Amino acid sequence: MATSTHPLPTLYIPHGGGPCFFMAWTMGPPDTWERMAAYLRGLGTSLPALPEALLVISAHWEEPAATVTTAGAPPLLFDYYGFPPHTYALTWPAPGQPALAERVRALLGGAGFATAADGRRGYDHGVFIPLKVAFPGANIPTVQLSLLAGLDPIQHLAMGRALAPLREEGVLIVGSGMSYHNMRAFMTAAAGPDSDAFDGWLAETVALEPALRDARLVEWEQAPAARRCHPREEHLLPLMVAAGAAGSDRGRREFRDRVMGSTVSAHRFG
């Protein structure tokens, strides 16, 4: 891929709850997701250049080997349940890019990771829901990369480091998750204080110089209320990939909101 004169940042974005941006929300105030949607809508104009391609790491795909989508026209994977019928007819026909998929495999393979390709899997809702808001034209080629089963933060930081050259090649690396993801605790009295404590730690951590940042991320379970915010860490690990790919660039929290009683944030590196 061509070298860009505008190295792109890496992002960790929230993808909301199911198809929340495309339905009337009845599980809380009607404007529950409006501020998050506004943040996502502004992503494109906040970048130094329009990406030539997107590489998205979603919380909703785990494999034993680092696996990439290789279809030229990936379908959508409606991996959410119990929502209005029209949300299963949404479209986001962004093309795939097999050449980028192979480049990702080459970079990861060169760093010692086992890799695989999946020519059938579609974009899951951690990809198409936020990106339908951020890039509604669906005209930027997109490849999805899985998390690694085992959910080891060291491995995911290392994956990001291996992928860092893509930033110079016009590829926007996007980690898609939720900085608070305790489904049982949403809207409970504990959600607010727990999420505030963890979010404060996260904002402080991503802003540190990279060696200290990465060391703290490896030990994320020691953060305040860590396991109460992430009983299972799949929604946090996309941030590890984004942080690893940041190289020497520090991060910053660029969005924060109270959603269903908990604090949720987005972070940018570079």
Image (spheres, helix red, strand yellow):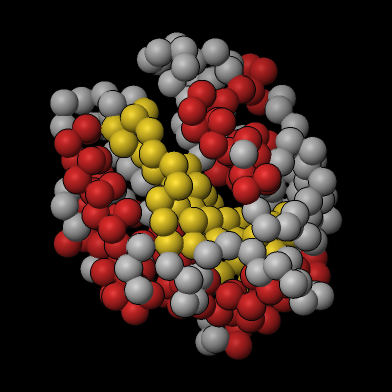
x%, y% of residue 222? 17, 62
Q: Residue at x 49, y 32 (%)?
A: 36
Q: Quadrant of residue 28?
A: top left
Q: Residue at x 78, y 60 (%)?
A: 52
| Quarter of the image where the N terminus is located | bottom right
Is residue 68 visible in the rendered structure shown here? no
Q: Which residue is drawn at 19% across and 40% down?
A: 194
In the picture provided, is 91 more to the left or to the right than 185?
A: right
- Looking at the image, how many numbered discs can be counted on the residues? 0
x%, y% of residue 142? 73, 55
x%, y% of residue 95? 81, 50
- Where is 79 relative to 234, above or below? above
Residue 268 or residue 225, whichever sits in front: 268
Q: In which quarter of the image is residue 83?
A: top right
- Where is 260 relative to 159, above or below? above
Q: Residue at x 20, y 25 (%)?
A: 188
Residue 253 or residue 154, whichever sits in front: 253
Residue 27 or residue 217, whichever sits in front: 217
In the picture provided, is 222 more to the left or to the right than 151?
A: left
In the picture provided, is 242 more to the left or to the right than 102?
A: left
x%, y% of residue 150? 37, 66
In the picture provided, is 260 more to the left or to the right than 149?
A: left
Q: In which quarter of the image is residue 135?
A: top right
Is residue 107 visible in the rendered structure shown here? yes
